[in-house]
Image (tube, coloured by chain):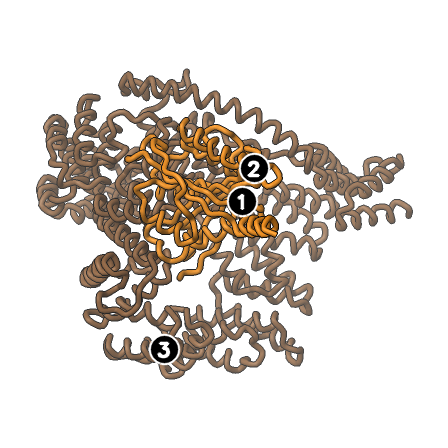
């Protein structure tokens, strides 16, 4: 495993993030996306290995009441200018609404995460996911979520290793990918599960 | 008296730079009606005013003071100082001499005089003054040193050594310090120059304990032992030096040399011994790479490449480039690299049977190397193939973008080159190297404004970037700008840039002034002599060559096609342009005017600030418009040319340019001299093929009145063209230069020159030349000469040639059908 360093995102290296996104991901992200991530760079990191930037992660925080941070603009949240995509986001919040307001906690959503193909299988991706999970605990989120293209079995395998589950299959999520179906992957955070189980035991007594 | 004390106070204030209170005291004296016109006070007041930046008042006061007291050495001295501060050295020397007439042993004036004499290189005068100073103060160190230096720079090493030896006798018993050590080494260096190697060696051994600069001592000893044939001692010394710095290639070379190896094998064995002492040192290995061959080279370079590629050393290619002169080594390196490439691709190892798995960066660096390698071989397609793969591999790594930019530069497409270097720049905006490189490429691509904007990221705020770069003597920016302006036929700006460079060289020479007293005080005499010699040949620098080259060509152009006096840019220029070009020029001019306006406003505000700031007015900027109005462009060209001829005789264009100038000036003997020198220093210059026939024809028609000159010319000509028949000579050249398009072109021009009626045929031959056999540089060269009017082509001919070249060099910008200046990629 190569030594991986996580570098905070700022104006000086956002050009590297752009290059990484366009080299790794099949989706184009507009300048607006980069302006927005720079608003909340604490949810983003560049991964540095062998002295150069080889991977990245950009998240946004979605608070329990439906607002989101890390992407100040509600529209085009994923950088994917797809209307339906947005609606899915709304639905997701609906799920949260079911729970009692007191328990309503935020979700950390992974917008982009990846590593250059030549540098894979060296722990870059794992370091990035570990960062995200840690961040989610710090923010006291209930879960970490992301969408994965259904054809990307490697990615699904990768996230399952960290305890993510496929909870939903959303047809027509992507406009330019074939097939256009996305899978929603969710992992409840440790702190959330603990509080839940403790409440359950309380109820039991 | 009261006035006397006041006057002394003025002097003290001046020395302590308390100019304001000095002025007060001066006014106090002058307010006394008895001393209203006191010369020395007026002079001192003027000098003080000068320091406050009030130049005009200063001159008024000093001159009035001098008129009132022509017999005062103070007044003359002050007038001299004033002139000196305005860099009027010759006048200042005259003033000092006048001052000395009234006070011939005044030390201060003598010292000031000697400084000016060494500055203006009045060496005999300097020697005389230093002698006088020594006689007056024989107990002062500076007197002796100055006198010795005077002898030394006049080439009288014996006398210099005598002076120093005498002086040293007076120093015996004093504790040795750095300054004394420097003095001893200076003495030794004069002995070496005088060829007294044994004496020098004896000298440094005798004073070994007093010399604290051990490295210089060792270097000198090693060199001297070698020079007198004591190789074993020399080798011992160089071994010591090698231990001090195992990365110094010179030490290794000299050490091995001193060990007197019989052959390369011996040398390599010696080198191996050094390598064993310091296994991690690179210098012995580089020596071994240079001197080995065959299988040994292969195994050495194999290990070296793998180590460097694993580490990811960016300049690997540049380190090894010099080995490519040897075709075998080139093949070996290429072979190894291709092997790594396939093997890494398949199983992440340098060789299939290797045990270590490499990081992906090794593969990346192999691809970068292969790209640079193919670019070096001018195989653009392959070079681009590998570099694109490298960029794809790690798009966040900056180096491949730079390599890609360079590939396009070599392929002649500066616009593409700018795109990629700019990409690299964007990846690290804080990198000044990338910023400058990018700006330079932009200038080459003709994107003046973009280049300025790019530079502005690093220049001082509140000042136009161009102005700041000029102030900082940023030479590459000036020479590259001049080149671009020249290409765009913007003569005023071309000349302005060239003269700005010239101005900087003048300043650099001026700036040595402070070093005369400083070096003598600090006893850094070896460095001081080095400085004096450097300043004497500073215009031999490549930056000066570039600027002078462009300036001379511009003046030649102004001579050949004088601008119409009435409207700045002459008709002569626009006549020969096509409609399109004319339009382009018009819009360019408009843009330039607009830009200038903008700049002027920012400049004036900046300047105003500045004037308020330190009270000193800036020198007026050089005006290109004034420069092109010169009545005598050839004389102006000659000024630049003379520096090239004396200081850069090896520069490849010096003598061909000289011929062009002297041809137009009708200087027959100088033409012959230039041509002979061109043939000697750069026999492959294509211009020679045209110049010799020009000369022959010139001699045929020239009237030489002086018999001696006439005989000399005949003699020289018969040597240059032995068969006396220029056509035979040309025919012979034709055979010798079959392959080069450049030479082919010049031969056609030569024929057209001898027989003007064949011009059309010659032009046809040029246009029919099979460009597949030409290189890019030749085509650009021919295009520039055709556009200049050689072989008198019309617009249609030039278009044909451009189109043909474009077919052969599709990405070269020079031949792109429509190239708008402001076309900025991305």
Above or below — where is B757 with respect to B740? above
The CA span between labels 2 and 1 is 9 Å
- Name which residue lies at 56% across and 31% down: B620
The location of residue B142, given as percent across then percent down, is 64, 64
Pointer 3 and pointer 2 on the same chain: no
Above or below — where is B699 with respect to B219? above
Which quadrant of the view contains residue A103?
Answer: top right
Which quadrant of the view contains residue B94?
Answer: top right
Residue underneath mark 1: A142
The hue of chain B in the figure is brown
B507 left or right, relative to B228: right
The hue of chain A in the figure is orange
Please identify the residue farthest to the front as the structure is shown: A205
- Name which residue lies at 46% across and 36% down: B499
Q: Are marks 2 and 1 in contact (CB under 8 Å)?
A: yes
Residue B435 can be seen, yes or no:
yes
A28 or A83, which is in the foreground?
Answer: A83
Residue B551 can be seen, yes or no:
no
The location of residue A7, given as percent across then percent down, is 50, 50
Residue underneath mark 2: A64
- Name which residue lies at 37% across and 40% down: A183
């Amino acid at each position: 495993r190569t030594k991986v360093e996580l570098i905070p995102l700022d104006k000086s290296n956002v050009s590297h993030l752009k290059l990484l996104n366009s080299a790794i991901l099949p989706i184009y992200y507009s300048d607006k996306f980069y302006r927005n991530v720079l608003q909340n760079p604490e949810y983003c990191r560049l991964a540095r290995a062998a002295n150069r930037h080889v991977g990245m992660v950009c998240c946004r925080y979605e608070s329990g009441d439906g607002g989101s941070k890390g992407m100040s603009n509600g529209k085009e949240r994923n950088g994917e200018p797809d209307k339906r995509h947005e609606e899915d986001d709304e639905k997701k919040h609906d799920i949260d609404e079911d729970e009692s307001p007191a328990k309503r906690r935020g979700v950390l959503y992974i917008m982009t995460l990846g590593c250059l193909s030549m540098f894979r299988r060296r722990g870059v991706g794992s370091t990035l996911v570990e960062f995200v999970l840690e961040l989610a605990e710090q923010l006291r989120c209930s879960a970490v979520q992301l969408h994965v293209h259904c054809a990307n079995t490697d990615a699904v395998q990768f996230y399952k290793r960290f305890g993510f589950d496929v909870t939903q299959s959303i047809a027509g999520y992507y406009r330019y990918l074939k097939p256009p179906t996305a899978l929603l992957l969710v992992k409840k955070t440790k702190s959330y599960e603990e509080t839940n189980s403790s409440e359950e035991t309380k109820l039991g007594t | 008296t009261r006035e006397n004390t006041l006057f002394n106070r003025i002097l003290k204030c001046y020395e302590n730079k308390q100019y304001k209170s000095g002025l007060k005291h001066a006014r106090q004296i002058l307010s006394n009606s008895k001393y209203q016109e006191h010369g020395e006070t007026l002079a001192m007041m003027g000098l003080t005013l000068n320091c406050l930046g009030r130049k005009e008042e200063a001159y008024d006061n000093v001159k009035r003071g001098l008129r009132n007291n022509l017999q005062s050495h103070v007044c003359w001295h002050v007038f001299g100082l004033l002139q000196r501060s305005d860099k009027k050295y010759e006048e200042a020397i005259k003033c000092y001499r006048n001052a000395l007439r009234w006070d011939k042993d005044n030390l201060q004036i003598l010292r000031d005089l000697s400084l000016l004499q060494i500055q203006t290189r009045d060496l005999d005068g300097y020697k005389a003054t230093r002698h006088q100073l020594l006689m007056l103060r024989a107990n002062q160190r500076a007197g002796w040193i100055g006198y010795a230096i005077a002898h030394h720079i006049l080439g009288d090493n014996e006398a210099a050594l005598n002076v120093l030896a005498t002086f040293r006798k007076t120093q015996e018993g004093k504790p040795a310090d750095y300054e004394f050590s420097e003095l001893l080494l200076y003495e030794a260096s004069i002995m070496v120059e005088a060829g007294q190697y044994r004496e020098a060696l004896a000298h440094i051994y005798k004073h070994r304990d007093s010399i604290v600069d051990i490295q210089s001592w060792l270097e000198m000893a090693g060199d001297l032992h070698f020079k007198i044939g004591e190789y074993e001692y020399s080798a011992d010394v160089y071994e010591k030096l090698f231990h001090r710095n195992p990365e110094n290639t010179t030490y290794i070379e000299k050490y091995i040399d001193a060990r007197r190896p019989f052959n390369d094998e011996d040398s390599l064995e010696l080198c191996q011994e050094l390598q064993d002492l310091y296994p991690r040192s690179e210098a012995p290995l580089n020596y071994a790479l240079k001197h080995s061959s065959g299988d040994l080279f292969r195994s050495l370079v194999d290990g070296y490449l793998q180590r460097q590629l694993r580490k990811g050393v960016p300049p690997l290619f540049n380190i090894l480039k010099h080995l490519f002169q040897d075709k075998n080594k080139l093949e070996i390196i290429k072979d190894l690299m291709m092997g790594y490439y396939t093997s890494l691709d398949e199983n992440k190892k340098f060789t299939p049977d290797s045990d270590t798995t490499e990081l992906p960066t090794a593969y990346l660096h192999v691809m970068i190397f292969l790209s640079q390698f193919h670019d070096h071989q001018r195989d653009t397609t392959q070079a681009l193939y590998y570099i694109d793969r490298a960029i794809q591999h790690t798009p966040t790594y900056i180096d491949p973008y730079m390599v890609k930019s360079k590939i396009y530069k070599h392929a002649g497409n500066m616009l593409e080159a700018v795109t990629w270097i700019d990409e690299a720049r964007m990846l690290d905006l804080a990198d000044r190297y990338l910023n400058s490189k990018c700006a330079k490429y932009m200038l080459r691509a003709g994107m003046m404004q973009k280049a300025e904007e790019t530079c502005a990221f690093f220049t001082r705020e509140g000042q136009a970037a161009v102005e700041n770069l000029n102030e900082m003597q940023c030479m590459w920016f000036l020479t590259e700008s001049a080149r671009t302006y020249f290409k765009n036929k913007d003569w005023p700006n071309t000349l302005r840039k060239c003269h700005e460079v010239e101005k900087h060289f003048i300043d650099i020479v001026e700036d040595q002034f402070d070093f005369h007293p400083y070096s003598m005080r600090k006893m850094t005499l070896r460095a001081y002599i080095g400085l004096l010699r450097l300043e004497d040949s500073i215009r031999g620098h490549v930056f000066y060559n570039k600027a002078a080259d462009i300036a001379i060509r511009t003046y030649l152009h102004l001579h050949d096609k004088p601008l119409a006096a009435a409207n700045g840019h002459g008709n002569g220029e626009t006549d020969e342009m096509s409609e399109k070009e004319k339009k382009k020029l018009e819009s360019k001019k408009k843009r330039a005017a607009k830009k200038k306006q903008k700049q002027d406003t920012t400049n004036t505000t900046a300047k105003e600030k500045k004037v308020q700031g330190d009270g000193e007015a800036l020198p007026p900027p050089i005006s290109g418009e004034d420069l092109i109005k010169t009545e005598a462009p050839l004389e102006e060209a000659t000024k630049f040319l003379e520096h090239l001829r004396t200081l850069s005789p090896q520069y490849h264009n010096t003598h061909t340019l000289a011929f062009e100038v002297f041809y137009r000036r009708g200087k027959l003997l100088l033409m012959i001299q230039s041509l002979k020198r061109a043939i000697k220093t750069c026999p492959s210059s294509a211009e020679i093929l045209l110049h010799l026939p020009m000369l022959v024809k010139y001699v045929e028609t020239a009237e030489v009145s002086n018999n001696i000159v006439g005989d000399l010319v005949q003699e020289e000509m018969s040597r240059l063209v032995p068969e006396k028949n220029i056509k035979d000579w040309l025919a012979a050249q034709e055979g010798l230069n079959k392959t080069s398009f450049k030479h082919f072109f010049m031969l056609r021009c030569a024929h057209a020159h001898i027989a003007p009626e064949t011009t059309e045929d010659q032009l046809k031959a040029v246009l029919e030349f099979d460009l597949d056999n030409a290189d890019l540089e030749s085509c650009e060269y021919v295009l520039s000469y055709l556009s200049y009017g050689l072989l008198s082509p019309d617009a249609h001919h030039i278009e044909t040639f451009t189109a043909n070249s474009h077919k052969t060099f599709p990405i070269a910008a020079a031949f792109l059908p429509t190239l708008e200046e402001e076309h900025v990629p991305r």
